[in-house]
């Protein structure tokens, strides 16, 4: 595709910023000594079954969203953040509170640290807090797996070396939002603000330290037809695997408050992906990608108007199949899914491409 | 190479035409669909998704156009890649998307012949910004533009029509998206040539059966309607069908409805009755009503350019949607601009209209005329008989036989709504401005007509005498009152034995009305000899040579070559062809060098040679600007031409 003029990019940035409206000034002040959220799930950890702690740290949020670039078109994590930055002490306090949940739990354990941005961004998580948290993990022998998240620009030799040194031989994975393997889609439709080669460099650097990468893949950025979104998702999964991601997690768009996606959606110019699209993408990608790489999906707001959805009658069955697939990696879980609405989805795949009209009305 | 040309006969921007793509030809208007179907419905799909690319078809290049272009046949039309919903971002995105498509065409000119490309115009594009882009596309050979309708007739659908009106005249327009059957005729009328019937398939997948005005959902709780189409007849109980068979049946039915809707629209267009259909459809939904009204208002000059000045049927004007119809508004404007009352008029007599046309053949007008003749008959030509009506406004007696004054039909109940009263009152005000202050108005009206005069009263300088405002105007007492008033007027009318001039007045007024002010004096000079009857034919001879004839059945004047020569100095209603000698009975668009932009389809025109010599007269088959822009198609049907080698 010939290159889109910069003016286009500027417009997307402006509109992404404009979509935040006055919401930024209304962010609640919150107790910076408590994590934004935490929960424990049962997971497969190194071939055994164990407990995994997910922890969302309360920070000032993603620098890409805070700054001049306006943030990604579908993301309002910034609004979950705190209006003022959290200090190292506060962040350590948040971590301790969350860790307390794991008291008395047997080995093996896993810990997944999310922020509303990048764990490796020193402005968001001061270096002191980062090394403090990592050292606390290192001291807990039960913890066998660690997952953190970051934009690729913070994933470099220095930060990785430090992580590896502190955490020793534990399994480590860094989640990076690749979203799309296509630079045009990533920059224009998502306003992601980094290139495919930035992602590749981060994955390569992580490999050096034997750190795995989990690529997040977006299903249906705005300004794509349903079919383009499907094809883009499959291609991105294939690309991410080829680049060297160790796990691929696909995220169907859910319409978040105060985002450009929400503005489009409220005017009928965007519809979250069909669950059939998610199924089809997983199915096609699973057949193409090395079976050692897991392709997983845990759709948020599935079956809701703001989340990926079908007709309403089949949504829970299809969502369950998607979750089952994420555990088993067996495409056969999709083989028996049927619903009348699949015809309509098939129509949308053809007709949106021809008409370039968003088929947002429901069955 | 793709070419587009149109047949004779417009009804508003609606036309029938031909799209030649390589060796194949699509007749327009035409339906296109995602299934390869019979019955002249053309297939469409998108590259890389559907393997079957029949020829010719409409193939969408999506964002992933990198896919093997070898799948494209030479005869496929290519929908250029654009961005779904991009335009909503900002006003400038529409033009950015146009420049992207242009760039795409230039970058791929080695494999993609631009004459096969269809440019997509986002509904948010600023209509004032597209001309230069369209020029660039046009010079590459692009002849089709596509617009996406969302089917709710919201502002974006309205903007699509406005954008369409900006297309070069020799382009075809493709309506994509959700086009319900009731929208087919309106979009045809608004100048679209190709219609996406994807909605037939979407609806079927939603268990919906499309109808002419609405949509029926097939659910177990409601007994389905009766439908006689072959698809539905094959299944007396739709409710008993499994979903797949139901869907197939509904697809067949829905496609059938589109075919019926389109064929009806084409036939009505050819009979010049499409506008009537459109106005009837207005009532299918409030959205449809406001959609049409807004377009009538905003796109008047576009609609008017293609609206013929004659018609073979009675025009049916039923409600408010007719008040601003192009024919009607143009008539009112032409009365203002092109009617100039002869200076010998000293009295204006206001009369109500009648159901029968022309008015003078009606019972009521025959009574009025008898009263006039018996009182002031010898000076009747000094009376400006003026008929009040709506929505046409005022009609001077001289013009009661022109189109559409003699060719319209309204529900005559005598009550006018306030808009109609205002339309007629304004027309009356403009009309009276053309007369001197000392002219006297005799208003022989009551009921709604009286309301018209009363509401104009303050805006009129002349004095008004009401004959019998309290009772029906055709009663004996009312007619007697009229007679009394007229007799009182005899002094003003300065009776002497001068010659009556009605025939001259009529013909000059008609010539002015048809060709513009001044035409009457040129075509019917003082020495002209007129013969015949107004209700049939009146011929005009100058120096023993016939120059023109008024034919009552068509309500207009036709010219002879000599008439054309007389009229030429007016510099209107001419077309210039690239040559000196006319051959055959028509001139084709390719041969037209230039034409008066005021020419409308069906107008009487003068044909000039390249040296500006009048070499023929005839009837235009398209608008003056269309003749200049089209490369192909019938431009003028010749009536008379200079003899070759004479
Ligand atoms: S998606 Fe990630 S990078 Fe984009 S704004 Fe949200 S947190 Fe920041
Ligand atoms: Zn369903
Ligand atoms: Zn039927």
Image: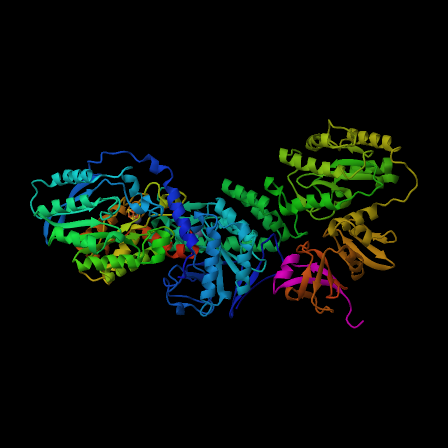
Query: Compared to B128, does B6 lie above or below?
Result: below
Residue placed farthest to the bottom in the image?
B645
Q: Nearer the viewer, residue B162 or B587?
A: B162
* Left-right relation of A353 to B374: left
**Residue positioned 19% across, 51% down in the render:** A324
Asked whether residue B618 is drawn in magenta, I would say yes
How many numbered marks appear?
A: 0
Q: Quadrant of the C terminus of chain B?
A: bottom right
Percent across and percent down for residue B30 are: 51, 59
Question: Which span of residues is magenta-colored?
Answer: B617-646
Residue placed farthest to the top in the image?
B470
Query: Compared to B2, does B571 lie above or below?
Result: above
Q: Nearer the viewer, residue A15 or B314?
A: A15
Percent across and percent down for residue B502 are: 83, 45
Q: Give the colour scheme shown.
A: rainbow
* Left-right relation of B373 to A278: right
Q: Report which quarter residue A39 is drawn in.
A: top left
* Residue B413 visible to the viewer: no
* Residue B157 visible to the viewer: yes
Percent across and percent down for residue A86 are: 23, 39
**Residue positioned 79% across, 38% down in the render:** B435
Q: Nearer the viewer, residue B6 or B124?
A: B124
Asked whether residue A128 is drawn in magenta, I would say no
Q: Nearer the viewer, residue B87 or B558?
A: B87
Percent across and percent down for residue B335 are: 72, 44
């Amino acid at each position: 595709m010939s290159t889109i003029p910069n003016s286009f990019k500027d417009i997307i940035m402006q509109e992404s910023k404009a979509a935040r409206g006055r919401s930024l000034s209304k962010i609640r002040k919150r107790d910076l000594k408590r994590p934004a959220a935490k929960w424990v799930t049962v997971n497969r950890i190194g071939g055994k079954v164990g407990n995994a702690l997910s922890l969302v740290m309360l920070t000032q949020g993603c620098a890409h969203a805070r700054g001049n670039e306006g943030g990604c078109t579908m993301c309002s994590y910034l609004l979950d953040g705190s209006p003022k930055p959290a200090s190292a002490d506060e962040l350590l306090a948040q971590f301790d509170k969350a860790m307390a949940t794991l008291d008395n739990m047997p080995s093996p354990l896993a810990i997944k640290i999310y922020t509303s941005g990048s764990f490796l961004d020193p402005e968001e998580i001061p270096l002191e807090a980062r090394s403090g948290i990592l050292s606390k993990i290192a001291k807990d022998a039960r913890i066998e797996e660690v997952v953190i998240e970051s934009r690729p620009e913070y994933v470099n030799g220095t930060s990785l070396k430090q992580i590896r040194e502190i955490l020793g031989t534990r399994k480590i994975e860094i989640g990076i939002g690749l979203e799309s393997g296509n630079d045009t889609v990533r920059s224009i439709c998502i306003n992601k603000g980094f290139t495919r080669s930035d992602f590749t460099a981060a994955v390569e650097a992580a490999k050096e330290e034997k750190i795995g990468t989990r690529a997040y893949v977006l299903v249906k950025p705005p300004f794509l037809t349903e079919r383009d979104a499907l094809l883009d998702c499959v291609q991105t999964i294939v690309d991410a695997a080829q680049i060297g991601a160790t796990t691929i997690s696909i995220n169907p768009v859910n319409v978040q408050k105060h985002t450009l996606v929400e503005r489009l959606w409220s005017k009928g110019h965007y519809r979250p992906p069909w669950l059939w699209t998610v199924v089809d993408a997983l199915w096609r990608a699973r057949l193409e990608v090395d079976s050692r790489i897991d392709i997983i999906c845990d759709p948020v707001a599935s079956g809701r108007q703001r989340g990926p959805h079908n007709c309403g009658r089949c949504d829970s069955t299809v969502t369950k199949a998607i979750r089952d697939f994420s555990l088993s990696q067996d495409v056969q879980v999709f083989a028996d899914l049927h619903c009348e609405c699949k015809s309509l989805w098939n129509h949308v795949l053809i007709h949106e491409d021809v008409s370039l009209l968003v088929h947002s009305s429901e069955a | 190479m793709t070419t587009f040309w149109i047949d004779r006969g417009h009804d508003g921007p609606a036309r029938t035409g031909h799209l030649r793509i390589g060796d194949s030809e699509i007749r327009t208007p035409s339906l296109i669909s995602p299934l390869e179907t019979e019955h002249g419905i053309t297939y469409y799909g998108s590259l890389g998704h559907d393997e079957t690319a029949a020829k010719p078809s409409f193939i969408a290049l999506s964002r992933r156009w990198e896919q093997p272009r070898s799948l494209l046949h030479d005869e496929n039309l290519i929908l250029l890649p654009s961005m779904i919903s991009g335009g909503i971002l900002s006003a400038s995105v529409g033009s950015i998307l146009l420049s992207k498509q242009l760039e795409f065409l230039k970058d791929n000119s080695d494999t993609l012949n631009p004459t096969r490309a269809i440019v997509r115009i986002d509904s948010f594009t600023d209509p004032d910004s597209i001309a230069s882009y369209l020029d660039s596309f046009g010079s590459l050979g692009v002849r089709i533009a596509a617009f996406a309708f969302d089917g709710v007739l919201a502002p974006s659908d309205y903007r699509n029509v406005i954008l369409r009106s900006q297309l070069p005249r020799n382009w075809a327009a493709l309506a994509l998206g959700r086009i319900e059957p009731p929208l087919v005729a309106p979009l045809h009328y608004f100048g679209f040539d190709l219609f996406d019937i994807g909605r037939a398939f979407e609806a079927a997948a939603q268990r919906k059966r499309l109808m002419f005005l609405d949509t029926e959902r097939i659910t177990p709780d409601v007994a389905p309607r009766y439908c006689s189409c072959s698809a539905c007849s094959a299944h007396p109980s739709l409710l008993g069908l499994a979903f797949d068979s139901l869907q197939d049946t509904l697809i067949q039915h829905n496609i059938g409805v589109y075919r019926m809707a389109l064929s009806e629209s084409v036939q009505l267009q050819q009979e010049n009755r499409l506008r009537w259909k459109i106005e009837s459809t207005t009532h299918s939904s409030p959205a449809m009503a406001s959609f049409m009204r807004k377009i009538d208002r905003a796109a008047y000059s576009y609609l008017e350019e293609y609206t013929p000045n004659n018609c073979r049927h009675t025009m049916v004007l039923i409600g408010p949607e007719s008040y601003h119809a192009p024919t009607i508004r143009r008539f009112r404007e032409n009365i203002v601009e092109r009617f100039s009352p002869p200076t010998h008029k000293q009295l204006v007599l206001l009369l109500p209209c009648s159901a029968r046309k022309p008015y003078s053949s009606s019972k009521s007008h025959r009574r009025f005329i008898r009263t006039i003749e018996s009182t002031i008959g010898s000076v009747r030509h000094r009376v400006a008989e003026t008929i009040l009506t709506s929505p046409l406004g005022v009609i001077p007696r001289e013009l009661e036989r022109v189109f559409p004054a003699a060719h319209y039909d309204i529900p005559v109940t005598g009550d006018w709504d306030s808009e109609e009263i205002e339309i007629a009152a304004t027309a009356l005000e403009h009309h009276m401005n053309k007369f001197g202050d000392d002219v006297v108005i005799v208003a022989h009206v009551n009921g709604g007509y009286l309301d018209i005069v009363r509401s104009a009263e303050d805006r009129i300088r002349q004095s008004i005498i009401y004959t019998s405002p309290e009772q029906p105007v055709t009663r004996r007492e009312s007619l007697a009152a009229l007679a009394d008033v007229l007799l009182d007027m005899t002094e003003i009318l300065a009776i002497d034995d001068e010659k009556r001039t009605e025939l001259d007045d009529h013909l000059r007024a008609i010539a002015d009305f048809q060709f513009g002010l001044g035409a009457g004096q040129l075509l019917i000079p003082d020495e002209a000899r007129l013969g015949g009857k107004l209700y049939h034919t009146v011929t005009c001879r100058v120096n023993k040579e016939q120059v023109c004839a008024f034919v009552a059945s068509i309500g207009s004047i036709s010219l002879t070559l000599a008439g054309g020569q007389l009229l030429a100095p007016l510099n209107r209603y001419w077309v210039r062809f690239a040559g000196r000698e006319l051959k055959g009975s028509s001139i084709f668009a390719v041969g037209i060098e230039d034409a008066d932009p005021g020419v409308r389809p069906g107008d009487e025109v003068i044909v000039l040679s390249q040296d500006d010599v009048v070499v023929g007269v005839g009837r235009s088959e398209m608008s003056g600007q269309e003749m200049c822009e089209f490369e192909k198609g019938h431009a003028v049907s010749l009536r008379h031409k200079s003899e070759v080698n004479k």
